[in-house]
Amino acid sequence: MILLRRLLGDVLRRQRQRQGRTLREVSSSARVSLGYLSEVERGQKEASSELLSAICDALDVPMSEVMREVSDDLSLAELAQSAADETAAAPMRPLLGPVTSVTAVPSTPDERITIKAPKKSAEAVDVVAA
């Protein structure tokens, strides 16, 4: 599961580290406790809009820039999760051996591909792409 608070915390931490600033410096500027800011950066606490505004002001970074970076990270996380879900859902079948030739017949309604097995076996396998 993708948690927005973790992505937001990661972006805030990267912004702070890019500036070479410590948690103590930013927490003091934002007027938030060091422990709470640390929890926000680690994705353990949800930042309210007021707190997020104070942190962005302390970092001198527009909130829109922070949210854009969070959005980019969220898109990447969704793509990675989708790819992982597809990989996990694909059934695994044993290999017959090295493939000797592949023939595609695109004129059929479903694209049909014939994969010929090695010469010592006379079997061929049809694969229909949906």
Image: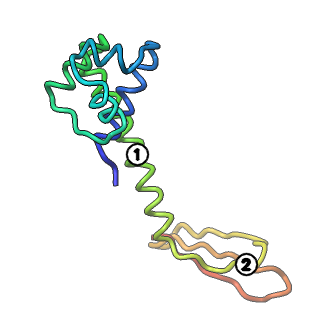
Residue at the disc numbered 2: 116
- Disc 2 marks a residue whose amino acid type is Lys
* Residue name at image x 46 percent, y 13 percent: 20
* Residue name at image x 69 percent, y 84 percent: 124
Left or right, 100 with reference to 112: right
Quadrant position of residue 102: bottom right
Q: Name the mark nearer the viewer: 1 or 2.
A: 1
- Image quarter where the C terminus lies is bottom left
Left or right, 62 with reference to 91: left
Position of residue 80 measured from the top left corner of the image (x, y, whole percent): 45, 50
Dot placed on the residue nearer the N-terminal end, 1 or 2 = 1
Residue at the disc numbered 1: 77
Element type at mark 2:
strand
Quadrant position of residue 36: top left
* Residue name at image x 37 percent, y 21 percent: 23
Left or right, 61 with reference to 119: left
- Image quarter where the N terminus lies is bottom left
Left or right, 104 with reference to 76: right
- Disc 1 marks a residue whose amino acid type is Ala
Position of residue 27 measured from the top left corner of the image (x, y, whole percent): 29, 19
